[in-house]
Image (cartoon, rainbow, N blue to C red):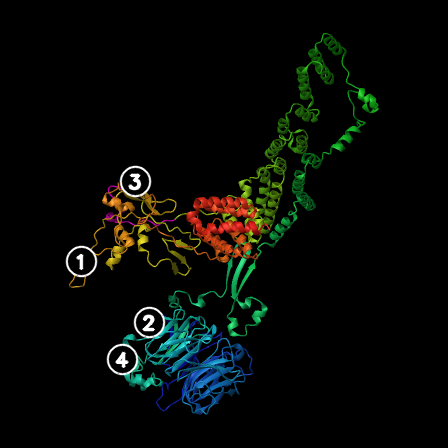
Amino acid sequence: MTLVTQIEDRGATVAWSPIVSHPDVIALGAKDSGNVGFDNYGGELELFDLGITSSTTNKPQVIGSVKTTSRFSSIGWTTFGSTNTTSTNTPLGLIAGGMDNGTITIYNPSSIIQTYSTETTTSSPSILSTIERSKSGAITSLSFNPHVSSEHLLATGSSKGEMLITSLESPTSPTVSSPSGGGGNDVGGNGDGTTEITDLAWNTEVSHIIASSSSNGIVTIWDLRQNKPWCELRAETSGSKISSIKWNPSQGMHIMTSSLDDRNPTLKLWDLRSSLDMPLATTESVENGHVRGIVCMDWCTHDDSLLVSCGKDNKTLLWDLVTFRPICEIPNDNAVTQQNGAGAGSAMDSFNHNNTELVTSPTGSASGLYGGNPAVGGGGLSASQQRRYDVKWSPLKRGLLSTCSFDRKVQVHSVLGVATKCGRPPKWMKPASGVSCSLGGQIVSFGSNASATPELAAAETSAPLAQAKIVSISTHVENPQLKALVETFESDTANGNYVEYAARKQEDATNIGNTYDAQLWGFMQVIFEQNSRAQLLYFLGFDPEDIHKVACEYNEDENSTTSGLDIAKLSLEEKKSVSLPMSANAEKAVSEALLVGNFDAAVECCIRSGNLADALILASCGGGELWAKTQAHYFASEVKKRPFLSVVSSVIHNQLGDFVASSDPNKWHETLAAICTYGTQAEFPPLCEALGDRLESAGDLSSASLCYMCAYNLEKSSKFWQIQLKNKNMNSTEEYYVALHNFVEKVAIYMLAGEQSKEIPEAVADILFEYAKLVADQGLFESAAKYCQSNKQECKELKDRLYRSKYSQACVQAMGVTPEFPFQFTNVGVAPAPAPSANVLTSGNSQNKVSSVHSAQAHSRNGYSSTQGQNKLSNGNGYSSTQGYASNSQKSQATQPIQEQKKNNFNQSQHTQNEPNQLAPGWVAYQDPASGRTYYANVNTGETTWETPVSQVQPAVAPTPSTDPYSSQGQQQVPRAGASSTPAKLASKYGDGFVSSASHPELAAQYGNVGTSNPYTDSSRPGTAVVSKIQKPPVSGTFNLKNLSQMANSTEYKHMIDDLLAIVTSLSSLPLMGSETKQMAEVEKGTAIFSKRLGRNDIDNNVAQKVDQIVTAIKNKDFAAASGIHTSLVNSVWKDNKDWLKGMKFLIQMCAKRLMM
């Protein structure tokens, strides 16, 4: 609690300024004579600027004052007239003063300030009007209507019970009316009543409802439209005086009353809808509350959970109305002086007991006589002098309140620092508006209705509606252009006509002059064709029919000559028969070689003479070796003159790889056409890739990417696309998004063509993931799911978010499989506490190899924690709701971790009860790695158990000091509660205590008769003692679709739970009759139990997978398979899962019967 400022030497009543432009201004109406003698009954109205937010001064300063002929009993301030709605110039509203002589005076604060600052008379008078009611007594209460539509109405109540409603629509000529009598108020009478009206309060929601409180303990609720009481509250059945009444600022049916009775100083909250005789809540018997009557109280308008009150006990308390307990006390000043001056102030205590105010003066007189001013008189202040009689919250400054005390101090306090002690921030600290963003551009916002619709904004004329908040959910598209591109792409390719889409893209690229994209989309069209290699030749510009026609109709140019012959003058037949001449010597050598059959020599002679054609003819007759030799020589000598011969050579010798390696990069189209024509189906892709490598090494990356496309190599094809995207990244964001979309279009269409690998390169997958994030931000979840192909952790998280969105099924269909949970489940155990050596759970020389650690077996994602038979659910505000047994000390001994005994032994019996037991001989404690639970194994027999094998020899218990003088030390040995021995347990079970060792192995081990035979092979024989096992709490079978769906969100089997709930819901919607109704109840019960146990991780993974197979079989209407899987579960895990397996059986039967119809 902070004292902000104070005004000295002012005994007054206070009204805060409601004018937004003057939030630091208060009006003080003097309640005492001030600095004059006893014969003066006048007062003064002062306006103070507290300077709280002023940058020039931080002290209160008088900015206006006016003298009055009588003192103030009450005062109020309204905003009426500040908006120029009246003919009177009142920019600061109106101030009404209720005087002790029964007069009601209306002031113009603007004129008062102006007159005070200029010391001249203004055209507008300071006093606008006066209402004389001399017979009605002092105006003890006064209140302006807080509603904008009715703020001109002023309600006043007098000490003689007269209640008036004054209309100030014309402040200079007000209209006065009085409601009819009732409720103990002499309303409408002649003012001769005896029942004082102590307070008035206008309803905060309904403008024509007002409440009045009386000194006889009755509160009357008035309906001014009907001009009669609406109801009465007998708030004080003893007839004690009610000091204050206040309406709940946000709930028009709640009203608070305060009692001035010292015997019952309480605050009472009434709900007019429930009872007029019994309060909804009260502060009676509240610790640290008021112990004497409450003088005044006020309800905070900015936070309806805060209320301030002051009482005769010198306490000013700030209340938390949620708990109805005080948060803190606003301290009084001069605590030391108060103690020293207690005697001097006793007379004043009685003087002020009858509502007669303390008269103090800075110059002495009365102040010095009664010790009211320590600075002058030197005396101390009594408790009654520091008692506060008025508290008011500022209507504009949040967390500020004013107090008035009998020691003539007006103080302003700030509760900003202490208001949070109630455990939550005040409402004024809560944001007036807020926003939260989610995946897909979803925006949840809240704020005032002014930001909602014009209709709501226009309706802000009423105060309660102006406080209303609007929660809106909207979708914000950050990049509309990208969203439009994605939607267009998805719609155009939805029918699967990718060739047509590629053709449109090629046309668009051609129109804008993008040659590469035009070629790329042309290649896209080709690779989707069935005869793609033939179509590729056409696309490269090699039409076989046109080439055939040109070759057949070829005619040599006129200027062409061959070996001196004029080819142009020769006829066609002559051209065919022409050949190069051979010399006579060469012809003779060839003839002689042929005559002797030496084709090698004849061919060699033809080659040397330049007649290669003759050499080839002769070599064809000389055998394969000669033919190959001659052919190689021909290609070697003629390929430079005729480049086309390189193709022929490569085809003949099956050396297309060498042909590609030596090809001209500038003529890659021809090379690709030759590969397409002569390459086999298996050779074509690697040859295209080799051509791409050659072009890439030559620096032609764009052409290389086209060749890689023919090789169905996405990794290499996309290199150039990535370079294009990277270059776009240097420009504007919008251009980059378009380029990113174009990249994804190429990859998406290309991956659908040919028989290429479905594995996406890591670099491409990362870009697709980037695109998926952008698309998801635009709200296109299904489209985003298609491109989540990366192995990054961020991509896994995005897939999981898409899977858990409201478009879960569509996203799973787009992804193809249910995504794995992106995070690893970790069983977080409890760290073992150090234990004394005497309490280690070992026996003999055996060592506890694994510390006893009990795992909480909980997943924080669903808020549950299973701890040995107890379920705790955190509700998010620091509290926890515990379900289970009130006491399970015996069970906790078997599973709780070893804990060090507390040193502060405030309760010896409780201390000994929690002390761990020693293990029986031969037993060692271990930890189960799967569950984290502690189990025990016998190193001698190999037996294992979850229960603690307690040793029969109990450690000695320290004697408890006794206060009984007749008790002896020998009687101090008290057995520990909850730690009885095994014989004692068995005796309690069988009553007489006689148990055979043959019926219980623990007794046989203890007494040494291990060899005692047991004729019964099972535990069903009469008298067999069976150690009870720790039972888990039963799981509720209540079928609540919403809760079960939320629980499914916390498991990795969400898809299974969703499908199972969908099947059960569809069954329940069908008309059922006869036994089907009972079966359906079992189905819902089994489904609920299975879902809850699965959410708590209480179902084995193998069992959960089996159930997943059952659900899948039901969806596929393979009920025989579902029944078979169920039968295997019944045969193997019935004992631990029988609570839901029965319902699963009925589910399969009903689906087979009803869903097949």
Earlier in the chain: of badge 3 and badge 1, it is 3
Earlier in the chain: of badge 3 and badge 2, it is 2
Earlier in the chain: of badge 1 and badge 2, it is 2
Give whichever of 573, 711 is nearer the camera.
711
**Circle 3 — which element?**
loop
Task: Identify the main secondary structure in magenta.
Answer: loop
Residue 941 numbered tag: 3
Q: Dot 4: within a 10 Å radius of its alpha carbon, few (fewer than 14), some, or many (20 or more) residues?
A: some
Instruction: Say what amino acid the circle numbered 1 marks.
Output: Gln
Tag 1–tag 2 contact (CB < 8 Å) = no
Earlier in the chain: of badge 4 and badge 1, it is 4
The segment highlighted magenta reads 828-849
Q: Nearer the viewer, mark 1 or mark 2?
A: 1
Q: Is residue 905 visible?
A: no
Which residue is labeled 2 in the image? 287
Residue 1146 numbered tag: none
> Is 352 drawn above or below residue 780 in the view shown?
below
Instruction: Say what amino acid the circle numbered 2 marks.
Output: Glu
Q: Nearer the viewer, mark 3 or mark 2?
A: 3
Position of 934 compared to 562: left or right?
Answer: left
Tag 3–tag 2 contact (CB < 8 Å) = no
